[in-house]
Amino acid sequence: MTAHRPEYALAGLGLLLGSHILISERIPKGLFHGRLKGEFCAVSERNEQVSRSFFRSRIFRGKKVVVLRGGGMEGRGERDEVSNQMDKLRVGQGLKGNASDGKALSKNALKKKLKMERAAQAKLEKLKSRQSELLRSNLTKEEDLDPNKYRENRISAIERMKRDGEDVYPHKFRTSKRLSEFIAAYSHLANGTRLQDTMESLAGRVTSARSSGKNLFFYDLESNGCKIQVMSDRGGYLNTSQFESDHKKISRGDIIGIHGIPGKSRRGELSLFPSSIRLLAPCLHMLPKGWVGLKDTETRFRQRYIDLIVNPNTRRIFQLRSKIIHYLRGFLIDRGFLEVETPMISPIAGGASARPFVTYHNDMKMDLYLRVAPELYLKQLVIGGLDRVFEIGRNFRNEGLDPTHNPEFTSCEFYQAYADYNDLMETTEVLLSGMVYNITGTYRIPYQTQEGKVVTVDFTPPFRRIPMIPSLESFTGVKFPTDWDSDNARIEMERLCRRFNISCGEPRTAARLLDKLVGHFLESNITSPAFITDHPTILSPLAKHHRFLVNITERFELFIAGKEFANAYTELNDPDQQRSRFLAQQKDAKEGDEEAQPVDESFCVALEFGLPPTAGWGLGVDRLVMLLANEHTIREVLLFPAMRPAAVTVEQSQDADSPCSPS
């Protein structure tokens, strides 16, 4: 091998070491090459800095490259120190005149020499690693800044562009295709193809930015869950004088617009080859690294936009949520149901046993309540002749925050005239089994419990029926009372709870105690969908009495994996019975039950006009999304869940802190 400058004698060290090529970082004009144990080694004749991508390129594949000198870059002194130490290594390895006298080494001397070579090799590897870190720090120095400093630098750069008359936030950028359409149109292209006569305009967010010297830049462009590569080289750029300055404006996280030709790289990656690039909206904050993602749950839920940018799984969850709601709506509309909207605030918080939110109307000078359920309004529509109605919307309950409860949540409720709860059980089976199969392609889905156990939830119809009271009697070995409104029933329920160590907070009414028994013995043992049926009247103030059982209602609840998902019953349509049920609820309210339903006389009057035999049904949409997304907390399936106030100091509010920290 011929060396044009003294330091290139070091390239010969590659021959001696067998696995390393040592070259200077700045390459002079001229070309030299040679064969290093079967690997072709060449050096560019351009007088420019050699980038990391150059070292990863084909000509150095199979060899470990060590860069020696700085060539005017930052950190030159450190690199010179590394070079000096490598010179020492070279001497230590016996590469300068070793055994030049031609005499054979003794056995001990040979052992000593081999030991020294191994130590020198280890030190060389350490120095090489340090040198790589130095080079990498120069190429990604912006990413290594403190987040506050990064933001300051970005703001300064944007202000300079504004002073120069650039429109950093343009009003519009006309795109020719969405990224999904671009991928569908050009995925068939052969490797290395460029459609020179086709021009496309795309826009999206830069999620990765890298360069190979001053003449080649790569970006990953993402939009709406799709990603393509942008491969920008000086030769294809329309205004070559602006090539470097245009790319210096772009950082990871920015929104950019690109005009260019479609094609594929030689490695087969679908790409857009730009003729021009424009900054559309800069990202002033440092985004979390793509390969790490955003793990902090406080930040993910408080700043959901960051979560959506860097965590693909979050986007998939909300796409799944959209599919579920779309399927629900389509299923009901196809069966003749009319979608309606009912009030969000009303003078009475009826329709469900829950603690409401209270607000105040200034003009009417009265308290109003955010709805806990749309039930009473929907049944009034059935009275008015709308035989099949449904609503998908928000409800509000002023209750605790836990993994399965949020103060506002989404439900789907429908009411069907001339049907009963048996009809709705069949409808529920068809609806949910069809939905799961449509979305997942199977009736059997895996679900990981909060304890970490993976179970199989089987939606194959029909679902199991579990009559409430007979099943409790089977578990406890006790005959349950039938006079649920009596003190004797409450005393018996309390005795059973103490016997089986089941806790129940105040007020310890018969209804609350019975509900705890059901949760302990029945709900917790359900994995695949099952109906718990035939609830006592004290648990169901709006349900119609059972045709054959005393003080029992025609009601069912659907449970899956130990949690309630749906609730339905044959509707009570006798106005006198409805009034007496409401009054019975007031007894529990006087004992301190804040979830007891109030007397709604206007609804009772509506019943006097005649509600046809009707069945009503309600489903918790959020919990269904949790199940199909295999998530355990409701906050994962709500874009903006309720959060407790974050402690923010005056200094924090004035200072721009990292987006990876809670705000």
Image (spheres, rainbow, N blue to C red):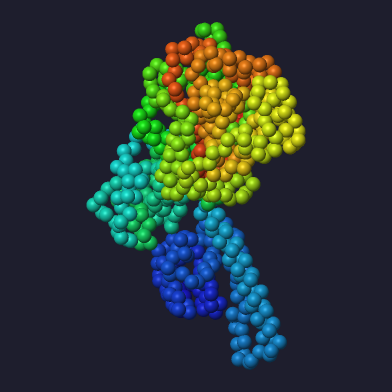
Q: In the image as oriented, which residue stretches furthest toward the front?
A: 548
Which sits in the foreground, 268 or 31? 268
Q: Residue at x 35, y 29 (%)?
A: 336
Q: Is residue 98 above or below residue 274?
A: below
Residue 260 position in % (x across, y down): 31, 49
Which part of the image, by quadrant, shows the C terminus? top right
The residue drawn where x is 73% and y is 33% is 496
* Residue 169 visible to the viewer: no
Q: Residue furthest bottom?
A: 103
Height in image: 300 above or below 654? below
Of residues 258 and 576, the one drawn nearer to the viewer in this rendering: 576
Left or right, 30 with reference to 492: left
Report the residue at 57% width, 62% height from top. Answer: 131
Horizontal arrangement in the rendering, residue 249 relative to residue 405 (left or right): left
Q: Nearer the viewer, residue 267 or 576?
A: 576
- Where residue 319 appears, as percent x and y from the top left, is 44, 41
The residue under the point 51% across, 54% down is 139
Residue 475: give x, y in percent of width and height: 67, 39
Displayed quadrant of residue 483: top right
Left or right, 99 with respect to 319, comes to right
- In terms of image quadrants, where is residue 106? bottom right
Number of residue marks: 0
Q: Indicate the position of residue 96 as horizontal and vertical percent values.
A: 59, 80
Does the rendering let one see residue 57? Answer: yes
